[in-house]
Image: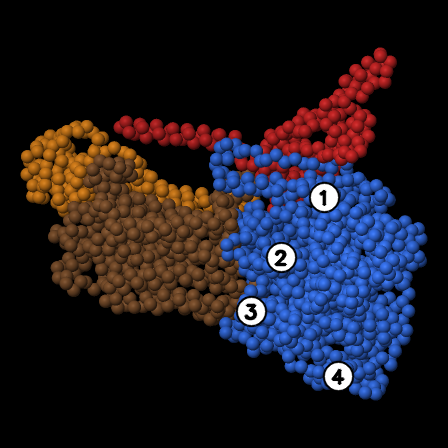
Chain colours: A red, B brown, C blue, D orange
Amino acid sequence: MQQRVITIALLVGLCFGLALLVSAMGKWRMPDNQQGYAPEQPIAYSHRLHAGELQIDCKFCHSAAESSRYAGIPSSDVCMKCHRYVTAPFDAMQQEMHLADEEKRKPKTIISTELQKLYDALALDENFQPIDGVTSQSIPWVRVHNLPDYACFNHQAHVAVGVSCQKCHGPIESMERVRQHATLSMGWCVNCHREATRDGINGHEVHASTDCTVCHH
Amino acid sequence: MAETEQQQPEPAATEASELLRPTLITGGKTPADVTRDICAPMEGRPTALWWGALSISLTALLAGVVAVTYQIAMGIGTWGLNRTVGWAFDITNFVFWVGIGHAGTLISAVLFLFRQKWRTSVNRSAEAMTLFAVVCAGLFPVIHMGRPWLAFWMAPYPNTRGSLWINFKSPLLWDVFAISTYLLISAVFWYIGLIPDLATIRDRSKPGWRKSLAGIFSLGWVGSARTWHRYETVYMLLAGLATPLVFSVHTIVSMDFATAIIPGWHTTIFPPYFVAGAIFSGLAMVLTLMIIARKVMQLENYITVLHIETMCKLMLSMGCIVGLAYGTEFFIAAFSGNPYEQFVFLNRAAGPFSWAYWTMVSCNVMIPQLLWFRPLRRNIAFVFLISIVVNIGMWFERFVIIVTSLHRDFLPSSWADYTPTIIEITTLIGSFGLFFSCFLLFCRFLPTIAMAEVKGVLKNPRRAAKQDSSKGDAA
Amino acid sequence: MPRPTAPYATTRFVKRIRMTPLSKNTPSNNDSSQGQLPIVEAAGPLLEESLAISRRRFLEAAGFSLSLAAMSGCGRAPVETALPSPIQPVGAIPGQLQYYASTCAGCPSACGLLVGTRDGRPLKMEGLPGHPLSSGGLCAVGQALPIGLYDSHRLTGPLSAGKPAQWTTLDQEIVQTLKQINEKQTAIRFVTPTITSPTLKANIDAFLAPFEDSKHIVFDAVSSSAILDAHEQTHSTRVLPHYRFDRAEVVVSFGADFLGTWISPVEFTSDWSTRRVPSEQVPEMSYHVQFESRMSLTGTNADLRVAIHPQDQGPLIAQLTEKVSKLAGISLSEPLSPNIVDRHESALAELAQRLWNGRGKCLVVSDSQDVGVQRLVNATNHMLGNYESTLGLQRPSRQRQGNDRDVEQLVEELRAGKVGALLVADVDLLHDLAGQQTLVDAIDRVPLTISFSQREDEFATLAKYICPDHHPLESWSDAEPVDGLISLAQPTLQPLGDTRSVLESLAAWSARPTTAYEALQTHWKEAIFPRRQAETPNQFITFWEKSLQDGFIETRGAGTVVSDFDTSVIKPLAQQTTTNDFSLVLYNKVSMPDARHAHNPWLHELPDPVTKVTWGNYVGVSSNDARELGLVDGDIVQVAAGNEAPLLELPVLVQVGQHDQVLTVALAYGCKGTDRFAKIGPQWFEARPTVEENELVGKNAAPFVEFRNGTMQHTRSTVTLTKTGKRRDLASTQLYNSLEVPPEVAPHGAERREIVQHTTLAAFAKDSHAGAAVHHHETGAQLWPEDHAKTGHAWGMVIDLNKCTGCSACVIACQSENNVPVVGYDEVRRQREMHWMRIDRYFTGEGEAMSIDHQPMMCQHCDNAPCETVCPVLATVHSSEGLNEQVYNRCVGTRYCANNCPYKVRRFNWFKYEHDDSLQNLVLNPEVTVRSRGVMEKCSMCVQRIEAGKIEARSQGLPVADGTIQTACQQSCPANAIVFGDMNDTESKIHAALENPRRYEVLEELNVRPSVSYLRVVKNEDEEPHRG
Amino acid sequence: MSDRMLLATFEHEEDLLDAVEVVRKKGCKIIDAYTPYAVHGLDRALGLRPSRLTWVCFVCGMTGALGMLWFEYWVGALAWAVDVGGKPWNSLPSNVPVAFETAVLFAGFGSVFALLGVSRLFPGKQVLPVLERVTDDRFVLLLDETDAQFDVSTIKAMLSPFNLVALEERVVSGGELQ
C-alpha cells in the first residue's frame, strides 16, 4: 500500500524535476555563444558619445563596410581627423578657454588621458608632429564580434541591400563600451535570412540565400 | 527452421517420449542439479584455463587500445586507406561484428518463437555474445571517423544551427539507429531472461556482495505465478520484436552498400544475402564459444552433441544460402549487361584481390559442405575447426565486398591498391580482445545457461503427458 | 586596372600587416603601383595561430564535453586583438583584392602577369588578359611564384665569405677589387641566363663598359643556341625567330616540346589551340606531326606521333628537306644526309606533300642542338615560304639568347685562370655545368666571384660575395620577350629581407647609385619612349602610366637587319656513327623548367603532365626495354656514359611510346638545399621521408651534358644501364594508365571505357556527333523533375578536351586559390595527393595507333550527387545554384561520400597537414578556410569567387555579367579550354558551349547529371577511330 | 486478507498443477503459487486472465513509428528543406528504416517497463521469499485460511496424494510477500 504512495511520490518528483530542467535549459548558453561579451578596450572609446550624441555616421570610421567583407577598424589617422583639434572633453576645453581669456594668455592644449594614448600610439609630440625615430604603433583594440574563420560574414553584401548596422550590432549608438548584442549563432543568421527573403528589407525584395557555401567556404 | 527438430531420433532411445523428442539435457539432472552445476563456476575459484584465456584477451584488448589511441592522436592516415579506398578494415570489422551479433538474438528469439526447446542451453550465452559483438561493432563507425569527437553530431539533438538536423536519407544514419536499437533491445531481452536466475543466485548465496548485487538486480523476483504469467507474455513480445529487428539491422547494414552507386555495392540482393551471411557467421561464433565454454565450464551435459549438431545443420543451410548468393551476384552481373558491374565481378575473381575472394569462397561455401556428413557434425574438434574457418571466411566476405568494389571503380585513372597498416591489424585484434574479455567475465560472474528455462525442459518420468500437449502448440 | 578588383577583405590580416606611408623616394603620382607597399611582419601571428583555429579547437573540446560546457554556460574563447594600421595607405581597403599588371619572371618567356594582392600580400598569380603573347594564360611555374616569395629559406641579406655582411662595407670591398681588376686589365665575366629585360641588359653593358676585357655571357641551362647560330649563318643575324603557331595549318616538330617547355610554351599553347577547334560550319583544324624519341607533352597532343631514335632526327629532317626541295623544284647537288632512315619514308613523303600544299601556312621546328640540322630546318621553312608568316625575323623573339660557344669559352678561360672577376646572376653555374671537371677549383682561383642568387646554391657557396637579388614580386623590372613588345614588372610588396635588385647593385658598384625604379624609368625615357608608336601618348609620364596600367606596351621594333636566305649554307650533314647502345635524352619537366624553382614545393608535388610522377626525377625506359631487362617502376638503375665519370642512380619509370634504346632523365634536379624537404608531410612511424638521408630531391643529370661543335648537347649516345637491385617507389598520382581495362578481367565488348570520347576530323565532318558513346541504358530520366528547379543561377563548366594539352597550369592555379596543402612524397605514394583538380592521362592502344588523352577532372557538381545522399550530417549538400557544397566545419569524416563518388574527386585530410612555417602561411588565401584534419574537401568551383562576384554585382545593382566570375583554373588556362558560367543565362558563353555537338558528360549513363561536361576529342586523321 | 495462510510445498510441477485443480474445485482461495520456472499451464489452472501488456506494446510501437515518421518529415521537408542529391524533400522510403527501428525500441521498452510496473519489480526491492528453494527446485502453493469450513487437516488430506513435501501455517502481514 505505502509502496504505491512512494511510487507515485517518486513519479511526481521526477516529472517536477524534468519540468525544472527544461525551463532551465532555456537559460543555458550553448558552447561558443559569446552573447553579451563586452571586453575592456585599450582606449575607453565611447560609441554612445560618437555615434549617439555626436551623430557621426558609422561609415565615417568603418569606411570599408560598403566596399569590403570587413567593416574595418579605423586606423588611428582617422581619429586624428577630429582629435588633432579636439584633445579633451568639450567642457574641459571650454573651461581652459575661459581661464585663458581671463588670464589673457594663449589657452594651453589640455589632453585627456585617453586621447594621450592615441597620440602616443601615433608617436606625435605635443604639436602633433611625428617624433623622429619613433614608429607609430597600432592600437590593440580587442575584437568583440568574433566569428570562427569557417564562417565568412560579408559586410558589403549586407550594407549593399540596406541591412542596418543595428540589426546585428544592436543599439551600438547607446553603448558606452561595445557589447556583443546578438548570439551570432548560425541559427540566428539563418532565421534573419529567412525573414529577409520572406518580408524583404525595408520594402524592397531580397533573396537572402540559405545555401551553406554562402557563408562557409 | 522447425524441421531441423524432426531429425532422426537417437538410435539408443526406445522410450515413447524419446521417440517424440530426443534428450536435451543428459545425465538425468534434477532442477537442483541444474542450479548447482550452473552456479558452480560462479561460486568456485576460476580455473587456470580461465585465467589464461582472460590474460590473453586482455593483452589483445590493450594492444587495440594503444593502436586506436595512436590513430585518434595522429589521424586516419595511420590506416592504409587512400583517396580511392576510403573504407577497408574499419567497416569490414564493423559488418563482421554486427554479423556475429546476429546469431545470439536469432537463437534466443527466433527459436523461441519456433518453440525450439534445445535453444535453452545456448540462448543465454548467445545473447551475451550478441551484446559484446554489437559493442565491438559499434566501436568501428565511431573510430573510423575523421573527427570521432564529433560523433554526437549523428544524433538528432536540438541545436542552434537554425533547425539544421541530420540527414535521414543517409544509410549511415539508418545504421546509427539500427545498431543502437539492436543493442538496447538485445540488452533488455538478455536482462529480462536473467532476472529469475539472479533471484536464484540471490536466494542460494550467503550474505555478501554477490547476494546483495543479485538482490538489487533481481528486482525482487519471487517466482510468483502471476508475475511468471506476465513475464512469459513480455518475453514472447520481446522475442516477437527482436526477430524482425534482427533482420532489419543487417538489412540496413547491407543498405550502406546496396544504396550506393559503386558497382559491386549497388545490388538488390544484398539484404537477404547479408542477413544469411550474418546468421552464418553468428552461428559459427556461437559454436566456437559454446565448444570452449562447455569444456572450460564442464557443461557437457547441458550443451550436448545434439546442440552442436543442430547448430551445424543450421550453419550448413546458411552456408548454402551464402553460396547461392555468390553465384547469383555473378549471374546478375553477366545478365545485366552492365559493363562496370561485369568488370567488378571478374575483377574480384581474377583481379589483384582474387586471393581474398577465393579464401572467402572456400571458407564459406566449399569447406562447410563437409557438414553433410553426420560423423563430422558430431565430431566436436572438427566442428570447432569449421566454425573458426567460417569466421575467417565471413570476415573476408566483407573485406572482398568493400575493398575490391572500391579499389577499381569507374575511372581507371583513380584505381588504387590497398594494404593495411599495423595500426589497422592491431585494431582488429583489439576488438577480438574486447569481445573475449567481456565474454570470459560474463562466464565468470553470470549463469552461462538460463537455469529457469533449462529446468523447464528437463526430462522427468511424469512429463510424457505434458509433452503431447506442448507438441500440440508447437505444431 | 585590367579587371575589376573584387572587394575581398579581412581584418584577420589587417592585424598582421602594418601599412606604411609611401617611401620617401617614391614619386607620389604612381600610386597604382608603388602606392601601397606594406611591410609584412613576418613574425606576426598567422592564420593557423589566429583565434579562429583555437576557436575550432575549442569546438572540438566542446564536442567532448558538450553537456559540461552547456551546464557551465561555456567559457569565453581567448581574447583576440585587431591591429588596424596606424595610417591607412591611400586607396587601400582592408582585405580587398587588388590586381597589379606585371610580367612573369618564372622563365624568359616573360608572359603577362596579373598579381592579385590582398592587404599588400601577393597571393594569386593570374594571366594578364589581352597580353599579345600569353593572351591571358599562365603556366604552372608562373602560378607557383608566391610560395617561392614567402620562402623562409631565402637569403635575408648579403653574405661576404659566407658570413652576413652590411651592404655598405660589402660595396666598398667590391668596388675596391673591381678597381684593381680594371687596372690590372684582367677579364671580367658577367654570366646570366637569357635576359629579356632591356633595362637590365643596358645596365649590365654600362657596368661592363669601363672594363678592358669584359663580356656578358648568356648561359641557358637548356639553350636553343643552335637555332640562333643557324640563323646567323642563313640570315646573317643571330636571332631566334618568333614562331607563330596560330598561323600554322601544318605543324611538324622534331622533338621540340613547344606545348611543354620549348621557348615560350604558354604563348605557343594558346596559339596552337586556336587551330584546334573544328566547328560544324568549318570542320577544319591544324595538322600536327611530332617526331620525338621521348614522350613529350607536345607529342601526347599530336595528330600523328612518330617515335624515333635521337640519332635519326638529323637524317629524317634532311630527307624531309630533300622531298620539299623536290616539290619546290630546287635541285640539290648531293644528298643532304649520308645516313638514310627509310623506316618513315612514306610518312615523310605524305608529310612533304601536306607541307607543300600548306605553303606559307605551315611550320617546321626542331629542338636539335646541331647547327647543321637547324640550317636544314631553316631551309625547309624558307622553301615553304614560312618566314615572316609563321616565323618572324623582322621582330624576332628574345626569349632564348643563350650562346653556348661563349659558355664553352668561359669554361676554358676559367680553367686557364684568365678570369679576374666572375659575376653570376640567376643561374647556378656549378649545378648546370656539373659536367665540366675541375670547374670548382678553377672558380675558386678567380679573385672576385659574386653571386646574385637568392639562395646559397652551389656557385653561391663558392662565391666570395653573395648579393641576393629580390624575388621578382619584390622588384621593378621590364621585359621585351619579342621585339617591340615591352612589358613592365612592378613590385607588389616591399622586400621581405635586406635584399637588393641586381640593377641597384650594379649601379652602386659603378658609382652612380640609383634605385631600380629610377633606373627603369630613365631607361624607358631614353630608349623605350622614343620607340613609341603614333597612337600612344606623347607625354612620357602618361606613356609610363599607361604602360604600368596595362602591364605592357607595343612599340616599333628595334630594327633587326635580316639579310635574305643564303642558300649556299645548305650543306649535307656530317657522317655520324650509328650505335645500338642506349642513348640518353636530357630534358626539362614541364613543372621544373630550370634549377631556380628547385625550392618550390608546389612544383615538386605537381604531377608531371605525362608521367604523373611527383617529387624528383627518374630514368624513363621504353616498355620494350623494360620488359627485356626485367625492370618495373621504382627499380633503381645506374646510368653511366661509358666507363668514365658521369653516372647516375635513379629509379626507373616505364614510359610507353618512348623509343626503344632511349633513356630519358629530367634536368634541374638534385639542387643544393632541397634536402630541406626531408620533413615535409606528416611524420608518423610508417611515413617514408620525402628526401632520404643526405639526399636531395632528385639527382642532377647535368654531368651528362657535353659541348659538341660549340653547342651543348642534351642527348648523349652510348650510355649504359645497369640494375642495382635497390628500389624506391615513385610517387605517382596515377597507377593505371589506360582506358582499356586489363584483358584478364575485361567483360566481352567493354574492354574500352568511353570516358574520353574520340572522333576523327573525317568522321566529324560527316557527322558532328560522331564518336558519341553508345549507352546500354536509357539516360536522362528524371525521377523528381519538379523538385529543386534551379531558378536563379545554375553554375556549370565545359572543358574542351581538344584544346586541353594537359599542361597542368590549372592544377597549381587551384592549389594557390584554394589553400590546397602540400603533402609530400609518402602521402602521394599512398595515393593521398590533395589536389582538387587533377588531370587524368590515358595511353590507350599501342604504337602509333595509341591514343593519348588528357582529361581535367574535378568535382562534377552533379545534380543527383551520390555523395550528398550518403552524408549522415548534411556536410555535403546541394546549393540552389547547382553547386555541390562541402561544409568543412560540419564534416565528421566518414569518407562515405568519397567512396560513393563515381569520379573519385573528393580529397580527405588524412592528417593535420602542417602550416607551421609562419612566413609560408602568408600565401594562404583568407577567403578559403584552411581545412583541419579529418574532414573531406573537394573542388568548390571557386565558390568564394562566385560569392564575391555576386556581391559586387549586387552592390552595383546589376545582374552578374557573363565572364566577370572566373574560376581559378579557367583564368589560368593557356589554351582557354575551360568555359565557366551561368547555364541559365542564355547569352553566356557556357550556354553556347552546351549546344556544342562535341559535348558529352563523363559517365552520363549513371544519370548523376553533372554540371561539368566535356567536348569530344577530334584528331586530324582520315580513318575511322578505333573502338574497343 | 487476513494474516493466516497455509503454505504447501511440492517437488514437481505436475503435482502443483494437479493440486491447484483440486484445491480450486474445493473452492479454497489460492493467494498465489511460486515456482522456480514458468510452469506450463499453471496460469490456466489458476484461471489468470491473458495479460493486457500486448496492448501496451502495440500502442508504444505505433507512437514510436508515427512520431518518428512525423519528425523525419518535419526535419526533411518543413524545418529546413535541404537539397540532398536531388532527392525529393519528403522521400518516404528513406524515412521508413529509422521509423521502424524507433517503433521496435519504443515497443520493447514500453512493454518491459509496463511489466516491471504492474508486477512491482524495481531494483533493490526487499523481499522475503516464501521459501528459499522456491527459486531453485520447489513449488509452493499459498492458500488463504480465512473462510468458513477451512480446516488444515482436510487440506492436508486433500493435497497428500500429490506427494506433498511440506505443509506449514504462516502468520504474516500482507504485502510482505509481494
Q: First in sequence, mark 4 or 2: give its number.
A: 4
Q: Residue at x 85, y 14 (%)?
A: A101
Quadrant position of residue C704: bottom right
Residue annotated with mark 4: C575
CA separation in Å, label 4 and label 3: 37 Å
Q: Which labelled disc corresponds to residue C675?
A: 2
Badge 3 marks a residue whose secondary structure is strand
Residue C641 place in picture, x, y as percent = 65, 74
Residue annotated with mark 3: C635
Badge 1 marks a residue whose secondary structure is strand
Residue D152 place in picture, x, y as percent = 8, 33
Q: Is residue C792 visible?
A: no
- Left or right placement of residue C247 versus residue C14 in this view: right
Chain containing mark 3: C
Residue C73 place in picture, x, y as percent = 52, 32
Q: Residue at x 36, y 41 (%)?
A: D110
- Left or right placement of residue C554 versus residue B230 in this view: right
CA separation in Å, label 1 and label 2: 27 Å
Residue lying at the far top of the rendered structure = A102
Neighbours of disc 2 within 10 Å: few (<14), some (14-19), many (20+): some
CA separation in Å, label 3 and label 2: 22 Å
Q: Answer yes or no: do the residues labelled 3 and 1 have beta carbons within 8 Å?
A: no
Residue annotated with mark 1: C40
Q: First in sequence, mark 3 or 1: give its number.
A: 1
Chain containing mark 1: C
Q: Amino acid at mark 4?
A: Gln
